[in-house]
Image: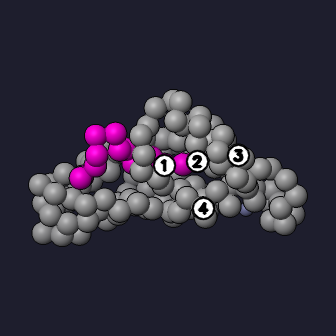
Amino acid sequence: MEFSVQTSRQRELADITEQVASAVAKSGVAEGICLAYVPHATAGIIINEFEPNIEADFLELFGKLFPSGNWRHNKIDDNAEAHLKSGFVGPGATVPVEGGRLLLGTWQRIILCEFDGPRKRMVVVKVVGK
Ligand code: ZN
C-alpha cells in the first residue's frame, strides 16, 4: 500500500510511524518484514528518535555534510544538496514485524526526511511474511 505526506518546509523531518503501523495492521502479517520506501530522489527515510531538537540537529548535520554550493547538478535544477542528502540517507527502511506489530525500540520512529520541499511525498509500504 501507499500513502502521501504533504511536507510544509524546504527541509524537515516527518514522523510517519503511525501510517506505516496502520499498513502493517491492514496487511494481516504477524511475522515478517516491513519495508517503508520513498520513490523520490530528494527525500529519504531514517529510523531514529523523533523530537524537535534531534530534528534540528539532523538538519544541521545534513547542512554541514552537504552545504549549498557550487555542485555540478545545480546547473540543471539547483537542488544538488537535496539529492546528495537523499543518497546519503537512502530511500527506505526495513523493520521486523513480530506479533503483527512493528518491532521498534522504545525511542525509534520511522521518519521521512524532506530535503527539497515543501512537496507531496509518496511513501510505499510493503509487508511480507505470514
Ligand atoms: Zn535535481
Residue plotted at (53% across, 30% down): 53
For the residues marked 1 and 2, what is the alpha-carbon distance in whole angstroms?
Answer: 6 Å
The spot of residue 32 in percent (x, y) is 20, 66
Q: Residues within 10 Å of mark 2 (few under 14, many from 20)?
A: many
For the residues marked 2 and 4, what is the alpha-carbon distance in whole angstroms?
Answer: 13 Å
Where is mark 3, residue-wise? 63
For the residues marked 4 and 3, what is the alpha-carbon distance in whole angstroms?
Answer: 12 Å
Badge 2 or badge 3: first in the primary sequence:
3
Residue plotted at (51% across, 29% down): 52
Where is mark 1, residue-wise? 112
Look at the numbered disc 2 and give the secondary structure of its residue.
strand
Report the amino acid beneath label 3.
Gly
Mark identifier at residue 114: 2
Q: Nearer the viewer, mark 2 or mark 4?
A: 4
Q: Is residue 28 left or right of residue 50?
A: left
Write down the region rendered in magenta.
102-114
Q: Quadrant of the C terminus?
A: bottom left
Residue plotted at (53% across, 41% down): 13
Report the amino acid beneath label 4.
Phe
For the residues marked 2 and 3, what is the alpha-carbon distance in whole angstroms?
Answer: 13 Å
Badge 4 or badge 3: first in the primary sequence:
3
Badge 2 or badge 4: first in the primary sequence:
4
For the residues marked 3 and 1, what is the alpha-carbon distance in whole angstroms?
Answer: 17 Å
